[in-house]
Amino acid sequence: MHNFILFIKEFHIYKKSELINAIASFSKKQLAVFMVILLTVFVLLIILLGKINQSFMVEVPVSGGSITEGIVGVPTLVNPVSSFSNADKDLTILVYSGLMRKNNEGEFIPDLAESFPTISPNGLNYTFILKKDLKFHNGMRITVDDIIFTIEKIKNSTIKSPRKMEWDGVTISKIDENTIMFTLSEPYISFLDNTTLGILSSQLWKDVKVSEFNLSPLNTKAIGSGPYKIKSVIKDENGLPEIYKLERFNNFSLGKPLIKKINIISYANEKDLLKALLSNSIDQAGGINPENANILKKYNHEIHTATLPRIFGVFLNKNNNKIFGEPSVIEAIDQAIDRQMIIDQVLLGYGSILHNPIPPKIAEDKLIEKYKIPNTEEANNILEKAGWTKGEDGIREKGGATTKTTTKKVGSKTFTQTVKTATPKTRLSFSIITGDTSDFKNIANLIKDQLVKIGVEVNVKIYETGQLNQLIKDREYEALLFGQSINHESNIYSYWHSSQATDPGLNIAMYNNKKVDVLLETIQKTLKVEDRINKYLDLGNEFNNNIGAVLIYSPLYLYATSPQLKNIFLDSVTVPSDRFSLVYKWAANTDKVWKIFNK
């Protein structure tokens, strides 16, 4: 063995000396070529090793860093009881936390609650147990009393909370210091949405008079238990909050947020917001319009998208125009409208086609759509068969003077009888009213141009917001181009059940279908999501067979950020502030580690 080792050593020495002698014998030219080859091999080896290393590496979020977000509007009610504007809600979801929170799949997860609630078999009682050692940003302990206090303020009619209707009829029982039970008067499939409500500190707010509730300094110097706490508020020359400086709350119930600091800066409008993004004064902003989104793409901004549960379409009032009483007319209109053209021309492609009032996130993607592409020829055939003929101006009409000849044979004699009848002519014409925005006006005019091809005359009428709202309230329209937000599943009942057809109901199509009513009532009492899906499919197919509105699209929510921001989840966005639901998982800094070390 000893001799073998000596042999190996001698072998290497011999080879090394031989190599040195060989190099020494090189001419200058040969030496230069050799050095180039050696250097090339070395560089290639380094590159190869780098690539091998990279193939085993993954990018992971790490703690630290800061981001600055711009918003339109001034947050003055950073308060879960009173927050009304989008700006208020943006700050509120950052600063406060509720019993439950939504994850990136739109599912509910425990926040302040220890676990998913215990729900009674009849769907009326929801019992929550709080996590232990919960704290507000100022170190005060969170108890059941804080939850009761918050909901009592919402129910107080003097405060006029926008969330009051959600909690009317809900009884609250304190089981012990960490356990609370809510009792509903009837099953309500969207109750868990209520429990995402941020919780106020009763100790901080107890001395604030109800009449001064929305004027308290605690609405800006807010203290909650959410992922971020307010460090300072910078006000403008008028005393309005302009910049909110936030820092992470290390004791947040779902874990220490990754990003250390978040600054929120207010702007008067989207034009100023765009300037700030392009000048890098801010890192990100939500609610960007399609045209600005395309501009920002060119300047290295990431555009994150989410399909909002909003439905836009033409709602038809057959009480004010009898042509909508004919299913063939509605069917032809629905067939003729080119939805993709509208999305491409008005939304620049940032939207999804809609045929049904059930949002894609619920069951729309599983529904069999009656019409997938527009078909002008088929729409014309439908109207022809229904007796609508084109006049000299190309617009269809029905009725007027008609002559009908009948023959009758009696024995060997044949009698001919001619009967002339006259009915009022009906012109295939209707008016669309809509809001005074560029999108609505463009969509209305596109619909007008598309329907004239099948002999339907459309008159477009534009109204400012106040007038439009009054016309909607009074149901004074033939057709209404409008949008509806489905913030939770119960909204579908409000929009389509026949009991909601008059103000203050929200059934603006005045849709009346007994089958749909029964399905909606059943869905309201079906608590398990998987059990509701089939009922939604039945509901969707009934809508397809009995069209109550010509629905067109759901818009995309557009969120512009810097490429450095990671872990953005927008799948569960129903309202703009939902983009912050998982803000504690966002990352401004990343690092690379070997895959085997990545959790």
Image (cartoon, grey):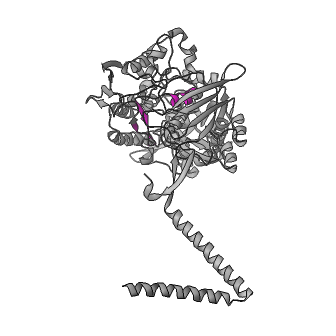
- 363 or 237, which is in the foreground? 237
Q: Quadrant of residue 420?
A: top right
Residue 305 visible in the displayed image: yes
- 162 or 247, which is in the foreground? 247
- 320 or 95, which is in the foreground? 95
Residue 395 is situated, as x and y percent measured from the top left of the image, at: 64, 41
Quick check: is 101 in the magenta stretch? yes
Range of the magenta residues? 88-108
Residue 337 visible in the displayed image: no
Q: How many marks?
A: 0
Residue 66 is situated, as x and y percent measured from the top left of the image, at: 60, 39
- 243 or 454, which is in the foreground? 243
Left or right side of 173 for 350: right
Q: Quadrant of residue 116?
A: top left
Q: Using the image, determine if residue 45 lies above or below residue 316.
A: below
Quick check: is 225 in the magenta stretch? no
Q: Using the image, determine if residue 400 lies above or below residue 53.
A: above
Residue 45 is situated, as x and y percent measured from the top left of the image, at: 58, 73
Left or right side of 31 for 118: left
**In this view, which residue lies farthest toward the left?**
121
Left or right side of 221 for 199: left
Q: Using the image, determine if residue 567 lies above or below residue 320.
A: below
- Name the residue at 70% across, 49% down: 299
